[in-house]
Image (tube, grey):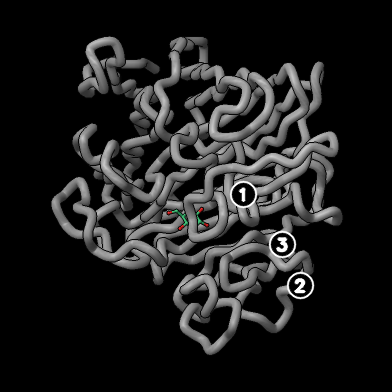
Amino acid sequence: MKIEKSDFGSLTSEEKVYKYKLSNSSMSIEIINYGGIITNINFPNSEGKKIDIVLGFNHLDQYLDKQPYFGAIIGRYGNRISKGKFNVCDKLYQLKTNNGEHALHGGIKGFDKVIWSVEEIIKKGYVGLKLNYLSRDMEEGYPGNLNVNVTYILNSKDELKIIYEAVTDSPTIINLTQHSYFNLAGESSGDILNHMVSINADSFLPIDEGLIPTGEFKSVNKTPFDFRELKKIGKDINLQNNQLKYGLGYDHCWVLNNSQKVIRKVAQAKSLKSGIQLDVFSDQPGIQFYTGNFLDGSLKSKNLKAYKKRAGFCFETQHFPDSPNKSNFPNVILNISELYKTETWYKFSNTNR
Ligand code: BGC
């Protein structure tokens, strides 16, 4: 197992960007210190040929331009906060709004757009990167100096483990996630509608027109949101349904079963074409399943094709959107002297080999 480091450009003369390639004997994962972005995941298809299964770009400039969070670490608060307003200790905070009237994915300059410091980890059976970022008090409007570590581990079992840790010196809110767009048939292979997906959730969170949860927990039974058994993404995505209309497809948070802060299997996806399967394990209460509905063909893929609508999907493990404003959603406040620690694993395999 090894880590190879290479130059990937720079933001300023002081802010250099590096790419780190983590490999085991069968696969590799490439990560940059800008945004902690996973740029490439190469995994063997049914013929044994390695294909790249995440959306992204070849050049830093494309990551610096407006782009929909390809591969990035998201924080401080992943997903939406209604009107960017929330209370902590009876004090009202106002974030900048960057998604219509709402705040999305940490703000104008979220964790996806900062340089992380990197420590390489080489151990028996795994390699990894420990990324660190200190988000200053009131950065993007959030209270408290928040010291964040995100550790990416690749082990010999083809598992990518992501461990998020944070401490604060003043009560704040936090909801970290990872925003990789997967296409298990290959990043330039077209849409993901033929992928099979299952999500271990009996209910999901309905949203309003602004994609803010209404607060209701709705059973998936007899709805297009029922992924309790493996189902093609495309099977129900175009049905007449108000929720699908608001999301332009799937762009919802599922309420994962057995939420006791223990790591358990929460979702699976599989491409019948490449045979590549992704199993997701997490200790989080929710998963945002987003089917790339806003991709519009304007961004060029790594193989110089266009990333069109539904070219990739995201499995963003997380706390529920707009939790700070929903008293019936689990707590997202981090207090002084508490350690925020959560874990998500993406396990890759190929059932045809
Ligand atoms: C959200 C989408 C959003 C996308 C950013 C997802 O996490 O749920 O609504 O458009 O991120 O491109």
Pinpoint residue 1: horizontal percent, then vertical percent: 39, 17
Left or right side of 38 for 263: right
Q: Residue at x 71, y 43 (%)?
A: 284
Per the model, the C-alpha gap separating discs 1 and 3 is: 28 Å
The reply to whether dot 1 and dot 3 touch (C-beta < 8 Å) is no
Q: Secondary structure at mark 3?
A: strand
- Which residue corresponds to mark 3? 201
Residue 277 in view, yes or no = yes
Q: Residues within 10 Å of mark 2 (few under 14, many from 20)?
A: some
Tell which circle, 1 or 3, labels the residue nearer the N-terminal end: 1
- Which residue corresponds to mark 2? 218
Q: Quadrant of residue 44?
A: top left
Residue type highlighted by circle 2? Lys
Residue 158 in view, yes or no = no
Label 3 CB-ligand 1 distance < 8 A: no
Tell which circle, 1 or 2, labels the residue nearer the N-terminal end: 1
Left or right side of 260 for 146: left
Q: Residue at x 36, y 15 (%)?
A: 2
